[in-house]
Image (cartoon, rainbow, N blue to C red):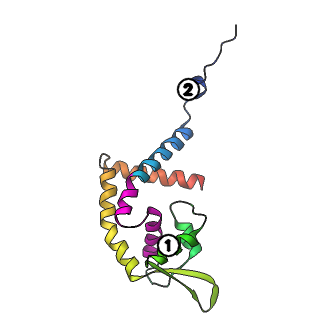
Amino acid sequence: MATRRTRKALFDAPVPADDVVVRCTRLADAIALRIAPFFKEHGLTALQYNVLRILYVRDESGEGLPSGTIGAGLMVRVPDVTRLVDRLEAAGWVERFRLPEDRRVVRVKLTREGTALVERVHAPLVAHNREMFSRMAFRDLERLSQLLADAQAAID
C-alpha cells in the first residue's frame, strides 16, 4: 500500500531561502505600515523622502543629479521617476534643469525648501526608526543590516 503524502508534507523540509523571502516581505510590509503615517504627518511619502534624501546626500555641490541616477538610488524600483519628480517640483522641493553643454540630460536639485524639509524630518525619522526596532539590541541591528546587505548583493 502506497503512503500518501499530505499537502503539509510538501513544506516540511526547511528551505531557508523561502523563509527569508517570506520574512523580508512581512518585514517590509510591517515597516511600510508604520512609516507611512510618519511621512504623512510631514506632508510627503516615503518614496518622495527617499528622492529628497538621495539629492541631499549625493549632491552636496548643488549641481543636481540626472534623473537616472536618482532612479538607480531609490529603495524600490519606480517605473516613472519623472512623475515622482513632477510631484516634488510641484511641492517646491526640487527643481529641474538642463546643462547648456548637454541638453539631453535632465538634472534635478533640491530647492532651499527641499533642503530644509530633509533637515527638519531627519532627526524625527531616526528617532521613529529607533523606536520601531527598540526591542532589538544595537549589535543585532548592525548584524541584521549587514546580512540584509549581503542578501541584496546576492540577488542584485
Q: Mark 1 points at which residue?
A: 87
Q: CA gap, disc 1 to disc 2?
A: 48 Å
**Label of residue 134 in the image:** none
Mark 2 residue type: Asp
> Does the magenta segment cover residue 42?
yes
- Residue at horizontal 51%, vertical 53%? 150
- Main secondary structure type of the part rendered in magenta: helix
Residue 59 rendering spot, x and y as whole percentages? 46, 79
Mark 1 residue type: Arg
Q: Mark 2 points at which residue?
A: 12
Q: Is residue 152 left or right of residue 50?
A: right
* Residue closest to the far right: 1
Residue 74 rendering spot, x and y as whole percentages? 52, 65
Q: Which of marks 1 and 2 is in front?
A: 1
Residue 70 rendering spot, x and y as whole percentages? 54, 71
Q: Which quarter of the figure is the C terminus placed in?
A: bottom right
Q: What element carries label 2?
A: loop
Closer-to-camera residue (151/40): 40
* Residue closest to the far bottom: 100
> Does the magenta segment cover residue 134?
no
- Residue at horizontal 29%, vertical 59%? 127
Quick one: label 2, few (<14), some, or many (20+) residues within 10 Å? Answer: few
Residue 68 rendering spot, x and y as whole percentages? 59, 73
Q: Which quarter of the figure is the N terminus placed in?
A: top right
Q: In this view, does 5 lie to the left or right of 62?
A: right
- Residue at horizontal 35%, vertical 66%? 42
In the image, which residues are magenta?
34-58
Closer-to-camera residue (116/144): 116
* Residue closest to the far top: 1
Q: Is mark 1 on a helix, strand or loop?
A: helix
